[in-house]
Image (spheres, rainbow, N blue to C red):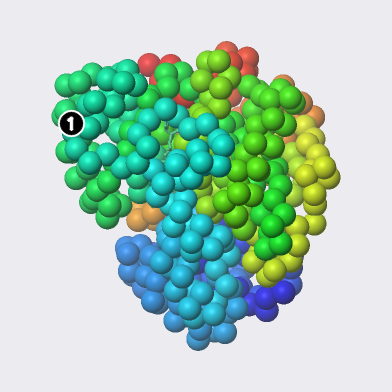
Amino acid sequence: MFRKILVANRGEIALRIIQAAKKLGIQTVAVYSKADAASPHLKYADTTVCIGPAPSSQSYLAMEAILQTALQYDCQALHPGYGFLSQNALFAALCEQYKITFVGPSPNSMRNMGDKAHARSMMQEAGVDVVPGSTAIISSPEEALRLSHQLGFPVLLKATAGGGGRGMRLCRSEAELGQNFVQASLEAEKAFGNASLYLEKYIEGARHIELQVLGDAFGNIIHLGERECSVQRRHQKLVEEAPSPALNEQLRNHFGERAIKAIKKIGYQSAGTLEFIMDAESHLYFIEMNTRIQVEHPVSEMITGADIVEEQIRIAAQHELRKKQKDVTFQGHAIECRINAEDPANHFQPHPGQITRFRPPQVEVPGKIRIDTFVEEGCHIPPFYDSMICKLIAWGKNRPEAITTMQTALKNFVIEGVPTTIPFALQVIQSKQFTSGKYDTRIVEELIS
Ligand code: ADP
Ligand code: ADP
Ligand code: MG
């Protein structure tokens, strides 16, 4: 096992990684930007190193500064968390060059899956259905138009390097497609340094269902079931749950087996997530793979008992997976709400500032509550990064119990100093659509209109 690991991230996920490392007896070096100098998570690391000023381009994305720190402090491994450098194949390759183990898949897997158009064609070749659309990058507006007529409107123009819910344009007509093509391409160039676009049929009223997989260096691959992430605003997830209310055991097994077969063909090591869209006929289509730990991983942990971050580190240290697929069992139901410093009454505007009061729910609930956060009373949510304050996760023996537990927890969670998304999360959890389980990616729009 590694002696020392560098945590190349911030906030709740940095603390989550530190905790997993501690469990494995590994020392941690946490890097931070000047804006995060007082972040409470730093107290839990063995060593902390300031790597630059607030802008992430000069700190959490500064490859050289991070690698130098890893070398200087004799770290054998580096965990990238999510966002920032977590899906940067060049960075993973540089780590390899400096003999620092990147806790994630190989640079090659990251490259293959990081280009979304390429990932689509690889998965299709491996026998997985993808959303009907282009077979590769689209080179001109004329080509996009031809294909859109074949597919039928609406279509979705997507940046092949896109992520975080950005780089997508819905086109409902020929005129909209014409207007959007050049603009989307320019935007993609600016945001992701890659102007390439591809095209998919837009599935109305789709559900987002994703599969958590784990693969080790010995070719063993398992899945930890699915997560339902259809509660989204601007293509960003707000509430996630596992299992999905839309899958039954038969569908789950079939879906899981096919996806694993494909992943085996491709060859994949570490934790990863295959994202799918499910249409009204319960047909699942692959949309992309995230080659990293995901924000919503705790719901899978709550129902399987796995520690996915610990598994990532063990896999990176060349340990074999401890479980075979038949040993993975699912218990109960888990729901996660992302609590952000945003004002739901004002178009969810990010609202950084000082958390003057932070009182997690201290109530008797039928299930269990888990809170993943780095926040303590008095600390600041800086304006430079994402506005997440914490993740609230509720577990119950079944879905209704998990919902009740989540409701009670949300009602008893006191955060003051900044507006939060707690009232909106409560509105979602109590809505008819959510409690019935029959909702899709339109749910947030329906609730705020
Ligand atoms: P998840 O599926 O884990 O919820 P998100 O799409 O919410 O993933 O992204 C997790 C984090 O990673 C967010 O902070 C998001 O802004 C960031 N992120 C995701 N993809 C990219 C990307 N291509 N470039 C930069 N940041 C990204
Ligand atoms: P990102 O890389 O930003 O996470 P994704 O390709 O995963 O982008 O898509 C993000 C979200 O956009 C999905 O969860 C879904 O809600 C919506 N979406 C993506 N593709 C389609 C599609 N073809 N039809 C309908 N909705 C889609
Ligand atoms: Mg996605």
What residue is rendered at 55% in x and 35% in y?
Answer: 128
The answer to whether residue 82 is above or below residue 7 is above
Left or right: residue 200 versus residue 266 is left
Rate crowding at label 1 as few (under 14), some (14 to 19) or many (20 or more) other CA atoms within 10 Å: few
Residue 242 showing in the rendered view: no
Q: Quadrant of the C terminus?
A: top left
The answer to whether residue 133 is above or below residue 383 is above
Left or right: residue 241 versus residue 279 is right
Counting the numbered discs, the total is 1
Q: Give the quadrant of residue 283.
A: top right
Residue 112 placement (x, y as % from top left) = 46, 54
Q: Residue furthest right?
A: 327
Residue 172 showing in the rendered view: yes
Q: Give the quadrant of residue 362.
A: top right
Residue 273 placement (x, y as % from top left) = 57, 45
Residue wearing tag 1: 142
Type of amino acid at the residue the image marks with label 1: Glu
The answer to whether residue 428 is above or below residue 188 is above
Left or right: residue 143 versus residue 409 is left
- Of the four image quadrants, the one with ligand 2 is top left
What residue is rendered at 27% in x and 46% in y?
Answer: 196
